[in-house]
Image: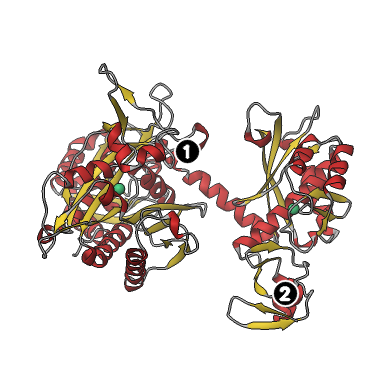
Amino acid sequence: MIKISLPDGTIKEFESGVTPMEVAKSISEGFARNVISAKFNDTILETSTALTTDGSLILYTWNDKEGKKAFWHSTSHVMAQAIEILYPGVKLTIGPAIDNGFYYDMDFGEQKISENDFPKIEAKMLEIARGKHDFQLRAASKADALKFYKDQNNPFKVELIENLEDGTITFCDHDTFTDLCRGGHIPNTGIIKAVKLMSASGSYWRGDEKKPQLTRIYGTSFPKQKDLKEYLELLEEAKKRDHRKLGKELELFTFSKKVGSGLPLWLPKGAALRERLENFLKKAQKKAGYEMVITPHIGQKELYVTSGHYEKYGADSFQPIKTPNEGEEFMLKPMNCPHHCEIYNSSPWSYRDLPKRFAEFGTVYRYEQSGELHGLTRVRGFTQDDAHIFCTPDQLDEEFKKVIDLTLYVFDSLGFDDFTAQVSLRDPENKEKYIGGDEIWEKAESAIIAAANEKGLNYVIEKGEAAFYGPKLDFMVKDALGRSWQLGTIQVDYNLPERFDLTYKGSDNELHRPVMIHRAPFGSMERFIAVLLENTGGNFPLWLMPEQAIILTLSEKFEKYSQKVLTSLENDEIRASANNRNETIGKKIREAEMSKIPYMLIVGEQEEKDGTVSVRKHGEGDIGVMSIEEFTEMINKEIKKTLKAFEV
Ligand SMILES: [Zn+2]
Ligand SMILES: [Zn+2]
């Protein structure tokens, strides 16, 4: 007999050789029908694999990330089979699951394939799926495996097998199809009910441009037709909300090949948006006891050697800048922290002076590979809403909680209510990877967890995800496609205070090391604005909108009255403009709707006579006629509702 422990803590006994599917059935037949993958002692396996030792078992359904992975990877086998049938002689390479689907890299040789061929491949895949063929993992000797692919004249699989140890090689069979595979499949093809091939593009064997060119076919699949339909609708919506598209439409930012990839240029409206966000945070930070500092964009190479950033970013990033002086080198700063450490070092501190909180909207530069660049979410120059808090170890708890409060205030003011938090701790098995003793780590880790609990955060704990210099708390926000982006971060650091020899005089008159907290509620202005755009589709909270209202005249005759309304709004600090052009009101409304301006004030003869405006709300339509004062009062009330003051 073997003992199997399940995630809910129960331990059950089974005869050796029991399969995960049989364990699932012992829990309930209904549950077992949904089980599609399993993990035993941290190894993903088939639901039909015999278990022969004690261990812990996790059973996955479609609703689990691991379940989806097995589902999509298995579908890649089905796609490979369909393509082998339709394109005899095609050479297979690898076909993993990825976020939202799978791909398979193949060598089509002289044969051509395009998106027009997708429907017939999809039809073949569904035909195979309906056959309800079991996926069966089978061990093979290295010699047999090599022979199998040498006979097929497939150099790619041969290369893969040559790098594997004899005795560890497995094949996966289903129907008439066989593929070299480590495992991790769903029970049978019949579970796949909907498939969609998304795109075909060029790729290289092992991602190396010097190696043979392959064709990568991306696809996705679902257990229900309805799920596929929903996914395609979501994709449509995401396209509309793509921040690169919206950024262009709303005239926020642009890129120039001449300036360089990954270096965003902020247009007037985008610069104004950033300025409003910065002022919003500056105001809250001032209340929270931060002091603004300013540091240069470059620093001597030695500064980053001291901080350790040169080691981390040096070779793969922008190279040092030389000067006419022999041996003198500067670097574009990849981080603001070293500069802030030197600000701390510019004066002696006593425990009574701490915490010191230095904040800066500091622009940093990192050389991302060109393939990694993506709109504003991955760039080569970006501005962090950075701050470094230097405090005594006793103040760490309190300071951490204050930073959480500030981050939650930022998220609340910007309408991010769907976020999760991740507490990243040390890997307890690999303590030597981290600097600092057990005591300080345990203290800092429990301080973060206590703070997250006290603030009621919805968080997960990830062991082994901490930075080498300290534990951290990250905030993740979902974009329109459901992809998670890391925005705000709070990190404890014991390393830089050592490296920069930071000290303060304690109540015992001795010198002590302060603890440092790095924090950025937005993360970076670029990524934050990108995610904000995708989250809101460009309909920002009213307080942040570049233009809150626009006056639309029914004809040129009312230009004077339009000007009077505009002046009145501006006197009340409402951001507004007027469209007095000689165009139809329908055209003016359409334009204003496109620009997502929240309020349209239509003025004509009646309005001028009565001193009123006819108000339309973006996306809603007419909301009635009101006096200018009534409108001002209404809009100010709405602004106050979305932007509360930060309470310390
Ligand atoms: Zn496989
Ligand atoms: Zn920092």
SS class of the residue under badge 1? Answer: loop
Where residue 526 appears, as percent x and y from the top left, is 36, 42
In the image, 220 versus 464, the foreground residue is 464
122 versus 89 height, above or below: below
Where residue 207 appears, as percent x and y from the top left, is 63, 35
Q: Quadrant of residue 65?
A: bottom right
Q: Is residue 533 left or right of residue 567?
A: right
Q: Mark 1 — residue?
A: 374
The residue drawn where x is 51% and y is 55% is: 482
The residue drawn where x is 10% and y is 57% is: 350
Q: Is residue 7 left or right of residue 566?
A: right
SS class of the residue under badge 2? Answer: helix
Q: Is residue 510 visible?
A: yes
Callout 1 amino acid: His
**What is the crowding at mark 2: few (fewer than 14 residues within 10 Å), some, or many (at least 20)?**
some
Q: Mark 2 — residue?
A: 32
